[in-house]
């Protein structure tokens, strides 16, 4: 299983939806709360090629993007393979 990282905010509905999908698949992930720890946001922006919104999701070395992209991978049947590495 690949390492999964989620940059999020506790007040973000898309963040909750993305984490809900990951949890429903039994995926553990490292969560970085950029609202409570704003010093993490510049690193997120750099890793996400300038994207400033949350969530920003990384699976292994792959930047998935946000919630919509995560769900699109799931709909396309590609998420499990990406998670498996």
Image (tube, rainbow, N blue to C red):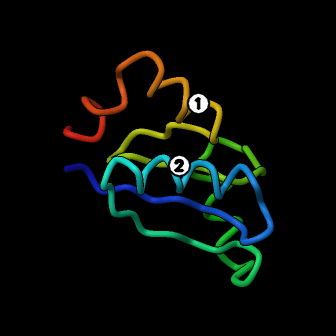
- Mark 2: secondary structure: strand
- Residue 80 located left or right of residue 74: left
Q: Which residue is mark 2?
A: 57
Q: Secondary structure at mark 1?
A: helix
- The residue at which mark 1 appears reads as 69
Left-right relation of 18 to 23: right
The residue positioned farthest toward the top in the image shown? 76
**Looking at the rendering, in which quadrant would you find the C terminus?**
top left
Using the image as rendered, state which of residue 53 and residue 25 is in the foreground.
Answer: 25
Q: Position of residue 37 (x, y in %)?
A: 69, 82
Instruction: Give neighbour class at mark 1: few <14, some 14-19, many 20+ (Cα, 10 Å).
Output: some
Report the residue at 40% width, 39% height from top: 62
Disc with the residue nearer the chain's start (2 vs 1)? 2
Q: Is residue 24 left or right of residue 17?
A: left
| Image location (x, y in percent) of residue 7 | 60, 61
Vertical order, 62 against 4 (above or below): above
Question: Residue at 49% of width from left, 46% of height from top?
Answer: 21
Q: Residue at x 34, y 47 (%)?
A: 25
Q: Nearer the viewer, residue 52 or 55?
A: 55
Q: Position of residue 70 (x, y in %)?
A: 53, 35
């Amino acid at each position: 299983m690949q390492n999964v990282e989620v940059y999020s905010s506790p007040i973000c509905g898309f963040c909750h939806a993305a984490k809900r999908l990951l949890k429903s698949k039994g995926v553990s992930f490292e969560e970085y709360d950029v609202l409570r720890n704003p010093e993490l946001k510049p690193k997120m922006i750099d890793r996400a090629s300038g994207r400033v919104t949350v969530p920003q999701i990384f699976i292994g070395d792959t930047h998935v993007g946000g919630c919509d992209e995560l769900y699109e991978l799931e709909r396309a049947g590609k998420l499990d393979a990406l998670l498996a590495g």
